[in-house]
Amino acid sequence: MSNVIEMKEITKIFPGVVANDKVNFSLEKGEIHVLLGENGAGKTTLMNILYGLYQPTSGEIFVNGEKSAIKSPTTAIKLGIGMVHQHFMLVQPFTIAENIVLGNEPAKAGGLRIDMKTAVDNVQKISDEFGLAVDPNIKIQDISVGMQQRVEILKALYRGAEVLILDEPTAVLTPQEIDELGDILKNLTKEGKSIILITHKLKEVMSMSDRITVIRRGVVVETLKTSDTDADSLAELMVGRKVKLTSDRTEKQAGSVILSVKNLKVKDSRKLDAIKDVSFEVKAGEILAIAGVDGNGQRELVEALNGLRKIESGEVMISGIDTTHFHTKDINEIGVGHIPEDRQKRGLVMDYTLAENMILGYHKKEPFSKNGIMNYPEVHKHGKKLIAEFDIRTPSENVLAKSLSGGNQQKVIIAREFYIDPQLLIAAQPTRGLDVGSIEFVHKRLLEQRENNKAVLLISLELDEVLGLADRIAVIYQGKIVGVLDAKDATERKLGIMMAGGQLEEGVKPS
């Protein structure tokens, strides 16, 4: 096969960091090529260079055999390169057709008015040609996340893309939508398109790709055919050591109820109902997972349980104490740990040192302070201890939190929350954006909490994570718990149906 893209000896240096170090990468016509690597390995940087968002420090790019200087995304689009970003860039009140032609609208005679009929016809034609099955007249706000992703792909195709770059395309999809995306991508390659996927999900790498390039610390480790490898080998190439991809969760009898939620109602920031009459409980020695597509009330639920959002009605009991209207500080005091979904906004003060971040929440207590005066020798001693215990990769405890990788930032939060030995740990998206090595670490720690007879409420978009860790799984849809499954009865298919609002015939207990 001929190469449609060749990137030769690409180096990208940011102040103090070599993000890409003499990287060679090629994309063949009609293939799906995955870029795989740990957080900070340089995958997205390399693709941002190909799309014109960054300029390489050195190296050359060839498009269809011709050397090309890709100075901007506009240049990339003219060369037939399109990029679908992880966070969709769609105008919610606009229709699908309006979003797709935005900035490139067909005009009526005279050029003063948009010819929407032609726009709709063009979008429908491209949708039919590539089997994307979208209705151009529906508004974005009325379609599923999976359909929104199809719209993003259509936007690139409408602009003539022959090469598609997809950055973490399955992050917010149900299992059924992931399967549908795989079929769509394979259909696109049959039509002659060439696709680059940036992802860390090994199962999807194995099912979707033709070739894989593994990058570690800015350097290409290996490029190989998917048919010549397996998930375990890829994980080892990514991290540089053997990684355990499955969790060792043993059967365990749950104890007394630690968290009891009854008829909870919570509003979102727009004063609309986000949590609607939700009830569930979590016992000592168990992990209850809340599964669902992002945006179905998970954030509001976690904030309400942690005292960060007002509870309109209902009751929350933690260890027999009514915490319905407690402040966050009081909830922490009774033994509740919280791993927030956004580690940088909610979990860390980015301009504080690691040692300072590791005492947040108990910084006013001895031995870290007395009478409002910080005891910094004890703060540093504590920081060093946790850095060693939780294998945080950092030169010292004096490094600022913002200088660490995402995985190490997450370890800082976990170290801090585990130090208080919480009776209840609320873990929201604890492995979001982490690589397989960091995921392995987080999973091990969550299971340790369970083994130590603590209660864990896990909120996750990752079904592999939910199925691997949870004892019971509650599925949330449009602010309601639509069913609870024992882990032994749960499958991706069952959970996917429930996450999309469907009902199972049997085996599901209503909340």
Image (spheres, grey):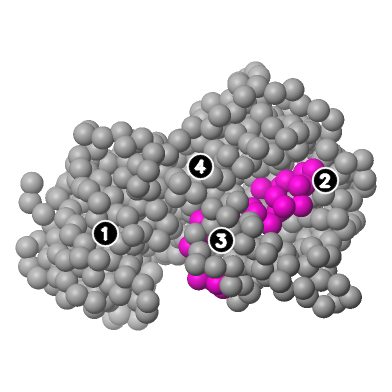
The residue where tag 4 is placed is 440
The dot on residue 219 is 1
Real-space CA distance between mark 2 and mark 4, rounded to the nearest whole angstrom: 33 Å
Q: Are marks 1 and 4 in contact (CB under 8 Å)?
A: no
x and y percentages locating residue 89 in the rendered image = 45, 64
Disc 2 target residue: 264
Point 58% across, 55% down: residue:
388
Q: Over which residues does the magenta segment extend?
A: 399-427
Percent x, y of residue 437: 45, 46
Front of the two marks 2 and 4? 4
Label 1 vs 4, first from the N-terminus: 1
Amino acid at the residue labelled 4 = Glu
Instruction: Specify the amino acid type for callout 1.
Output: Val
Mark 4 touches mark 3? (CB < 8 Å): no
Q: CA distance from mark 1 to mark 2?
A: 50 Å
Dot placed on the residue nearer the N-terminal end, 2 or 4: 2
148 shown above or below 444 = below
